[in-house]
Image (tube, rainbow, N blue to C red):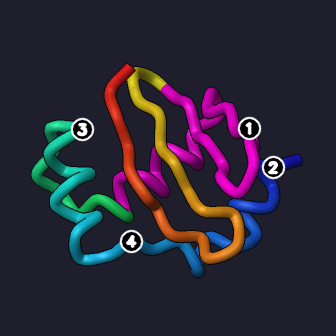
């Protein structure tokens, strides 16, 4: 159910200028982080949960935090 909400609003998913650097550093990636996180969300094996005001996308070795009202990617971490 939560995954469908994110997929339906995929065009709204974004991050802040500070978020870009934080996500790249935490996930150890050089590519554009919003596209990277969206590709992770779209994977068949991704699991989305909601706690309070945030969605959590867990897939492969990472956990991505997305605000449920603004669709802002707040942070992402390696598990």
* Residue annotated with mark 1: 49
Q: Residue at image x 37%, y 62%? A: 35
Using the numbered discs, state the Cα–Cα distance from disc 3 to disc 2 in whole angstroms.
Answer: 23 Å
Q: Residue at image x 74%, y 42%? A: 51
* Residue annotated with mark 2: 2
The magenta span reads: 35-59
Residue at the farthest front position:
52
Q: Residues within 10 Å of mark 3 (few under 14, many from 20)?
A: some
Using the numbered discs, state the Cα–Cα distance from disc 1 to disc 4 in whole angstroms.
Answer: 19 Å
Residue 47 is inside the magenta segment: yes
Q: Earlier in the sequence, mark 4 or mark 2?
A: 2
* Residue annotated with mark 3: 27
**Rendered location of residue 5, percent (x, y):** 80, 61
**Rendered location of residue 56, percent (x, y):** 61, 41
Using the image, determine if residue 20 lies above or below residue 65. below
Q: Earlier in the sequence, mark 3 or mark 4?
A: 4
Residue 42 is inside the magenta segment: yes
Q: Residues within 10 Å of mark 1 (few under 14, many from 20)?
A: few
Using the numbered discs, state the Cα–Cα distance from disc 4 to disc 2 in whole angstroms.
Answer: 19 Å
Q: Earlier in the sequence, mark 1 or mark 2?
A: 2
Q: Earlier in the sequence, mark 1 or mark 4?
A: 4
Mark 1 residue element: strand
């Amino acid at each position: 159910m939560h995954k469908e909400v994110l997929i339906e609003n995929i065009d709204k998913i974004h991050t802040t200028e500070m978020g870009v650097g934080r996500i790249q550093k935490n996930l150890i990636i050089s590519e554009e982080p919003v596209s990277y996180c969206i590709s992770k969300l779209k994977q068949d094996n991704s699991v989305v949960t909601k706690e309070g005001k945030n969605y959590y996308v867990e897939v492969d070795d990472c956990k991505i935090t997305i605000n449920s009202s603004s669709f802002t990617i707040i942070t992402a971490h390696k598990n």
